[in-house]
């Protein structure tokens, strides 16, 4: 099976290496020093239970690779419009595209659409709903040096789901090499609920992490921060339920795990490294859906407002296309 991972950063690099270890013929789209390191040395995975390196084909130009059996898009969401307009060489007549991204995905709301997560319908036009597979991933990863991905936990899980709810052969085909390489893979008939289950964790930890630039173990040592996280979980769950989803998340276990976590959320890493932040899909779209559903979110409103100011001062966010 030929699989291209479009965006071989932390999550993408981890998935690409696991896919290759599981027997897939893997290529990656990457850039800069990370690309050059992968070309020279492969992707090195350093996890608590295993360290390994996979050599695979790497380029910055999708035209170098040709049509694939599947594509996994693992870029940050601000880059999705660029992905959509350059992905065509990777797509055969039946190539599915799995979007392994954070926040409210571009395909989630059919109508009314949320402009900030797919301005001008660029993704919908160039890739389309027929090819799209939804996905959400649980894997604490960080690129520690070019070509090297540190994985924080033994347990790594990804969920795939067709937008229409069927359990498809194309999801199973992507899952097989990942399972063979030790990744837990679930295929769900309800990918929207899976999105909300992960999103609640992003909402609870990300805004606080951006403001403190600290990991869970430091943040949750403060009782007021724990109380704020619990309020966000409740507000996020209320939005999901208003939209017909009941997130499957053990909040007590999540908080308990957070108390010992030294991993900084990906959006915190983006701020610290000066990379575009996923505010539109994680926070703006969530608050837009809250307003649309009539769900009050006072704690999330305040924290997101502070995050916007912090990101704007860092030159990593603008008010363009904000929906809420």
Image (cartoon, rainbow, N blue to C red):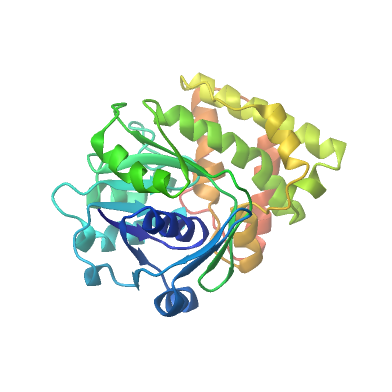
Seen in the picture, residue 292 relative to 78 is either above or below; the reply is above
Q: Using the rendered image of the protein, determine whether residue 262 is visible from the camera's viewpoint.
A: yes
Q: In this view, does 59 lie to the left or right of 199?
A: left
Seen in the picture, residue 28 relative to 122 is either above or below; the reply is below
Residue under the image location 79 percent in, 47 percent down = 217
Report the label total.
0
Instruction: Tell me which corner region of the image, top left, top right, bottom left or bottom right, holds residue 109.
Output: top left
Q: In this view, does 311 lie to the left or right of 322?
A: right
Q: Position of residue 231 (x, y in %)?
A: 72, 29
Instruction: Tell me which corner region of the image, top left, top right, bottom left or bottom right, holds residue 225.
Output: top right
Task: Point out the residue furthest to the left here.
Answer: 93
Seen in the picture, residue 165 relative to 132 is either above or below; the reply is above
Q: Nearer the viewer, residue 9 or 196?
A: 9
Q: Where is residue 130 in the image (x, y as percent from the top left)?
A: 22, 39
Q: Position of residue 42 (x, y in %)?
A: 44, 72
Q: Nearer the viewer, residue 110 or 268?
A: 268
Seen in the picture, residue 269 relative to 181 is either above or below; the reply is below
Residue under the image location 37 percent in, 39 percent down = 134
Residue under the image location 85 percent in, 43 percent down = 221
Q: Using the rendered image of the protein, determine whether residue 287 is visible from the camera's viewpoint.
A: no
Q: Where is residue 132 in the image (x, y as percent from the top left)?
A: 29, 42
Q: Which of 113 and 201 is in front in this view?
A: 201
Q: Is residue 111 left or right of residue 314?
A: left
Instruction: Tell me which corner region of the image, top left, top right, bottom left or bottom right, holds residue 41.
Output: bottom left
Residue under the image location 16 percent in, 54 percent down = 92
């Amino acid at each position: 099976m030929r699989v291209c991972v479009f965006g071989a950063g932390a999550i993408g690099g981890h998935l690409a290496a696991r896919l290759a270890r599981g027997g897939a013929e893997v290529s990656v789209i990457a850039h800069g020093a990370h690309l050059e390191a992968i070309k020279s040395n492969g992707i090195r995975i350093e996890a608590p239970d295993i360290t390994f390196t996979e050599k695979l084909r790497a380029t910055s130009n999708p035209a170098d690779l040709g049509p694939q059996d599947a594509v996994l898009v693992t870029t940050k969401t601000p880059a999705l419009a660029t992905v959509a307009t350059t992905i065509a060489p990777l797509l055969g007549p039946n190539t599915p595209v799995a979007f392994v991204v954070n926040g409210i995905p571009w395909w989630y709301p059919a109508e009314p659409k949320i402009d900030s997560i797919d301005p001008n319908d660029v993704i919908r036009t160039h890739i389309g709903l027929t090819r799209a597979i939804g996905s959400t991933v649980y894997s604490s990863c960080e690129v520690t040096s070019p070509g090297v991905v540190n994985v924080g936990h033994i347990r790594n899980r990804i969920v795939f789901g067709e937008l229409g709810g069927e359990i498809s052969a194309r999801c199973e085909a992507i899952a097989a090499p990942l399972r063979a390489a030790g990744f837990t893979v679930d295929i769900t008939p309800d990918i929207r609920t899976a999105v909300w289950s992960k999103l609640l964790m992003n909402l609870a930890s990300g805004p606080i992490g951006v403001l403190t630039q600290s990991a869970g173990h430091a943040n949750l040592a403060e009782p007021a921060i724990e109380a704020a996280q619990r309020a966000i979980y409740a507000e996020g769950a209320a939005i999901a339920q208003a939209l017909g989803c009941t997130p499957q998340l053990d909040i007590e276990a999540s908080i308990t795990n957070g108390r010992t976590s030294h991993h900084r959320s990906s959006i915190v890493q983006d701020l610290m490294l000066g990379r575009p932040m996923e505010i539109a899909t994680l926070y703006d779209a969530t608050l837009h859906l809250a307003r649309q559903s009539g769900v009050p979110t006072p704690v999330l409103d305040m924290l997101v407002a502070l995050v916007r100011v912090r990101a704007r001062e860092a030159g990593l966010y603008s008010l363009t296309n904000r929906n809420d």
